[in-house]
Image (cartoon, rainbow, N blue to C red):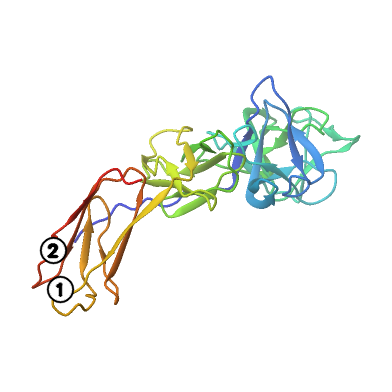
Amino acid sequence: MTWINLIAQVNQFPQVYNNGQGVGYSNLNIRQNASGTGTIITSLSVTSKIGADDFATSTESYGTATWARVCLPTTTSGIKYGYMMYGSAYARINEINNYATVTATNLNIRPTAGSSSWVTIGGSKALYGQNSIVALTGDTSNISGTTWYQVYLTNDCSQQTGWLSGTFLTLNSNTTNYYNVAGGVNNNSGVLIWGATVSIGSWTTNSTEGFYQYKLSPNWSGTITCSHPSYNTSSPASYSYTASSHNYTRNFVMSNSTTYTISGTITNSITSVAMSGVTVNATGLSPTTTNSSGYYSFSVSAGYSGTVTPSFSGFTFSPPSRSFSNVT
C-alpha cells in the first residue's frame, strides 16, 4: 500500500485583514457594496484591523476586482457588512488571524472593560450583530470573573478600539495555521494588471490593481502560474513553491511574445499519398502527429532553434530531419 501525503486547502475565511496603506498613509475606505463606485460608509485607520467572513468580485473599468466582506459596528439590530478592496495598499491578509465570533443577538461595544457606558456612532450606541467576525487586539481584562476582549473599530466609532464581553464571544484558537503567498502582477511596461487568474495548485484567485494574495496550509507544495486573456506569456512561466513562511514576492510580468509556426506535409514518396499518424518530434516541444492530409505544425517563440524529426514504423524519411536556427 502506498500512502500519499495530502495537504488540504486552509479555509480562507473567517479572516482578519489589515490596512495595507502602512503607517503614515491614508485611512482605507469601506464601501456599502463591492464596487469601486459604491458609497463609502466608513474607513479603517492605518493601525487597525478588521474581521471578514467572505469575499466578492466586481468588474471595474480596469478589470476584475476582489473585495473582502467585512463585519462592521452598527447602531441597529443585526449584522452589518461593508466591502474593502484587495490590493497591495488596500485590504491585506493579516499574518495572525486573531478573531472572535459574536454569539449574542446584539453585543454592545464598551469604551473600557466592564463599563456600563457605550462606544457610539454618531451619538448612538454601537454594537455588533450576531455572527459578526471581530478583530482582537490581543489585550484582555478580567472584571469580576468575566474576561473582556479589546477589539479594533472603524473610524465612524467614537474611539478606535472598544471592549466586548467574552461571555458572548467564540474565540478562534488556531490563529497561525497558514502562510500567506502574494505578489504583484504587471505588464512589461510596469502597468498594474487587474483580473489576472493566478492558479495556486488546483485553486485560483484574481489580481486586483496588480496584486494577489492567498492563504496556504504550512508545507503545502505545488505550482503557481498566472494568465490573463490580453497576454500570452508570463515571466516566470511558473513557480515551484512550498509554503514554509509568509512570502510576498511571487511576482509575475505579463507580455505578448511573437510566435512562429514550423509546419510541413509528409507524403509517401512512392504513392504520393499523404501519410497520417506520423509522429513528429521537435527539440524542446511536445510531439505531434500528422493529420489526414499529412500536415503537422509547431508553434515556437522567436529565436527558437531545434530539430524536427518524423518517425513511423516501417518507414524511413528523406531528409531524416530538418534543423532550424534562431527562427524569426
Instruction: Identify the image quadrant of residue 165.
Output: top right
Q: Who's the residue at 68% across and 52% down the image?
A: 59
Quadrant showing the C terminus: top left
Instruction: Identify the image quadrant of residue 154.
Output: top right
Q: Is residue 150 left or right of residue 278?
A: right
Cα–Cα gap, marks 1 and 2: 9 Å
Give the mark nearest the N terminus, 1 or 2: 1
Residue 147 visible in the displayed image? no
Vertical arrangement, residue 275 with respect to residue 254, above or below: below
Q: Who's the residue at 54% across and 34% down the image?
A: 189
Q: Is residue 9 left or right of residue 150?
A: left
The local secondary structure at tag 1 comes to: loop
Q: Residues within 10 Å of mark 1 (few under 14, many from 20)?
A: few
Q: Where does label 2 land, which residue?
A: 318
Question: Could you tell me residue 263's position as x and y percent?
Answer: 31, 61
Residue 210 visible in the displayed image? yes
- Any mark on residue 314, and which? none
Vertical arrangement, residue 126 with respect to residue 137, above or below: below
The local secondary structure at tag 2 comes to: loop
Question: Could you tell me residue 64's position as x and y percent?
Answer: 63, 50
In the image, farthest residue toward the right: 123
Q: Residues within 10 Å of mark 2 (few under 14, many from 20)?
A: few
In the image, farthest residue toward the top: 24
Task: State if disc 2 and disc 1 touch (CB < 8 Å).
Answer: yes
Q: Who's the residue at 39% across and 44% down the image?
A: 237
**Three-letter amino acid code of the residue under disc 1:** Ser
Vertical arrangement, residue 69 with respect to residue 263, above or below: above
Q: Nearer the viewer, residue 256 or 78?
A: 256
Quadrant showing the N terminus: bottom left
Question: Could you tell me residue 323's position as x and y percent?
Answer: 20, 51
Question: Could you tell me residue 34's position as x and y percent?
Answer: 72, 49
Q: Where does label 1 land, which residue?
A: 269
